[in-house]
Amino acid sequence: TFNADGAVELYHDNSKKFETVSYGAAVSGILTSTGDIKTMNDTAKFVSGASDDLQIYHNGSNSYVQDVGTGNLHLTSNGAAVSIDKGTSENMAVFNTDGSVDLYYDNSKKFETLTNGIKVHGHIFMDDNDEIRLGDSGDFQLFHNSSTGEARIFNSNAAGINIITDLFKVKNNANNETLINATNGGAVELYYNGTKTFETSNEGVTFDTNSSSTVLKLISNNDSQHIIQAFNDDLALKA
């Protein structure tokens, strides 16, 4: 049908399948092509839906797949995955069917989901005062306090913090001096300036005996008064 000053309409078995409109052409049904389908200018759109809900277009700078309707935009696949790529050689994100979601940086995997959680490849960086919170109520917290410069481990739950390990060490910032060393089935050792000064044993406790200076000193509330002071083999008790 050729309408004067209006549409050209094409039919199949008396059912309209194609017509020209003021803004271009409209297809009723499925459009198949053995070649490219092109819009000849920027901002022209491929649209679908009674209210043009789905729109695919290029605005001259960027390309868009846009859902302007009231529902959701779904990408579905019966294949192995849905992949967002740079060209044909680099992954940006891969959504594996019945499997992991993988996120990449410059084609290097940095994050993936697992059946029992997530896995990070590399470091986790957070801003000052932002917290890692664990527990239903966020009871356990790890964070860096920007005002004091301190890194803090905090548990707001009265149950406290339980560290489970066979060997526990605390070392200095340079990682070249031990401060505390605790061994399962063995001693707890305390150090001063890299030198062990105290350790527990099955018989009790042992203080450093390699120094010619004070070995054991217990101080009263008045710092000038020594209650017990030992030098070499001598022991002094003072009021």
Image (cartoon, rainbow, N blue to C red):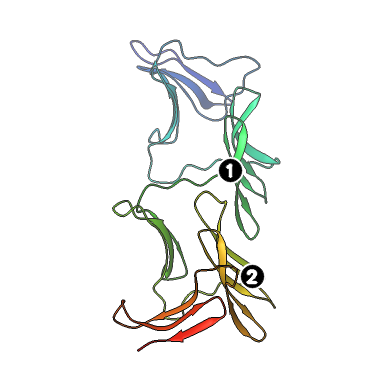
Mark 1 residue type: Gly
Which numbered disc covers residue 27? Answer: none
Q: What residue would you read off at disc 1?
A: 122
111 over 55 or under it: above or below: below
Where in the figure is residue 158, as x and y percent of width and height?
41, 80
Q: What residue would you read off at disc 2?
A: 165
Where in the figure is residue 183, as x and y percent of width and height?
66, 72
* Residue 93 in the figure: left or right of residue 63: right
* Residue 98 in the figure: left or right of residue 211: right
Mark 2 residue type: Thr
Please report whichever mark, 1 or 2, sits nearer to the chain's N-terminal start.
Answer: 1
- Mark 1, residues whose alpha carbon is within 10 Å: few (<14), some, or many (≥20)? few
215 over 52 or under it: above or below: below
What is the spatial separation of the Cα atoms under label 1 and label 2, in whole angstroms?
A: 24 Å
Report the number of numbered marks.
2
What residue sits 54% from the left and 30% below the top? 29
As helix, strand or loop, the secondary structure at mark 1 comes to loop
Q: Residue 72's quadrant in the figure? A: top left
Where in the figure is residue 126, as x and y percent of width and height?
42, 47
Q: Residue 35's quadrant in the figure? A: top right
